[in-house]
Amino acid sequence: MAGPTTAERGARTPKGSSGRPSRPGEPAGRGFPSLRTLLLSALALALAAGAVWVLYGSTWLRAEHVRVSGVRVLTAREVQSAAEVPLGDPLISVGTGDIEDRLRRELPRIDTVEVSRSWPHGIVLEVTERKPVLLIEKGGKFTEVDSKGVRFATVDKAPSGVPLLRLAAERSPSLRRFDSDRLLAEAVEVTGELPGEIAEDVRVVTVTSYDSITLELGRGRTVFWGSGEDGPAKARVLTALMKAAPKAGHFDVSAPSAPAAARS
């Protein structure tokens, strides 16, 4: 039997096809990339390579200076020295997280710090320092304690307006259940719950046991606070009691439902 004629073969071949049958798995009609596609790909690669060179290889975007903000007791120079910013390195490669960790480790006075890049040449260190709410005196020096109970610095001179903490619980049975750190935390919590005017007038906080905290105020007045429990209620009662008995010298709010005031 005779095979198909040339005309018949041409009729079966789609227009524009080379006539070569597709190999298994090969998309039908696949051709070579166009010149435009090749040019766009080359341009994209060139731009990417250029960006990498600008960020890492050129001298245009290098770390050249450090700016510090938020310091109160610390100096900008102290912070810059502890930060150890690698000046001269590409700005993009400066490890901001490493700098933050280093600052918190080297300068315990720092509570939080945010390190950011300031293009094209700067590193910015935004510092928040810890603020003392209590002082512990020992050997003529003062250890500062913040609102989280962290002992963060020892200074020769007591900061103005910060109460002195006296932990006098050496013989108290409370130490069997609550160590000195727990008692310190209770004292910190009490100072944080005091109304503003009263808090500013506190001179000494004495802790003799978990349920025996006493505040010494100006003009020789004292407040027996008791334990650290029911702090907000005790603060409200104390405020009302001091207004009702302005000449009293001693206030007892250890049981806020039955407060008392006396002249001495």
Image (cartoon, helix red, strand yellow):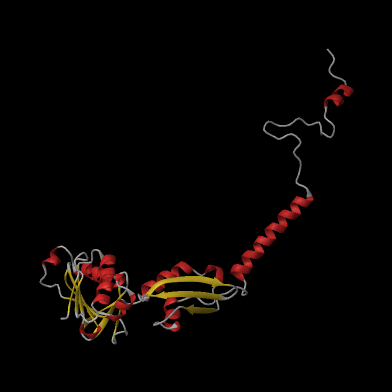
| Left or right of residue 118: residue 101 | left
Question: Toward which corner of the image does residue 162 lie, by quadrant?
Answer: bottom left
Q: Is residue 9 above or below residue 58?
A: above
Whether residue 68 appears in this view of the structure is yes
Q: Is residue 66 above or below residue 185?
A: below
Image point 75% across, 46% down: which residue? Answer: 33
Q: Is residue 35 above or below residue 27?
A: below
Q: Nearer the viewer, residue 80 or 108?
A: 108
Q: Nearer the viewer, residue 92 or 152?
A: 152
Q: Residue furthest toward the right?
A: 7
Q: Nearer the viewer, residue 221 or 162?
A: 221
Image point 10% across, 72% down: which residue? Answer: 171
| Left or right of residue 213: residue 111 | right
Q: Quadrant of the N terminus?
A: top right
Question: Toward which corner of the image does residue 237 lie, by quadrant?
Answer: bottom left
Q: Quadrant of the C terminus?
A: bottom left
Image point 75% across, 50% down: which residue? Answer: 37
Q: Nearer the viewer, residue 242 or 14?
A: 242
| Left or right of residue 216: residue 59 | right
| Left or right of residue 158: residue 95 | right
Image point 86% across, 25% down: which residue? Answer: 11
Q: Residue furthest toward the top?
A: 1
Whether residue 189 appears in this view of the structure is no
Position in image of residue 16 (x %, y %): 84, 35
Q: Residue furthest toward the front?
A: 244
Position in image of residue 97 (x %, y %): 45, 67
Position in image of residue 120 (x %, y %): 60, 74
Question: Toward which corner of the image does residue 105 lie, by quadrant?
Answer: bottom left
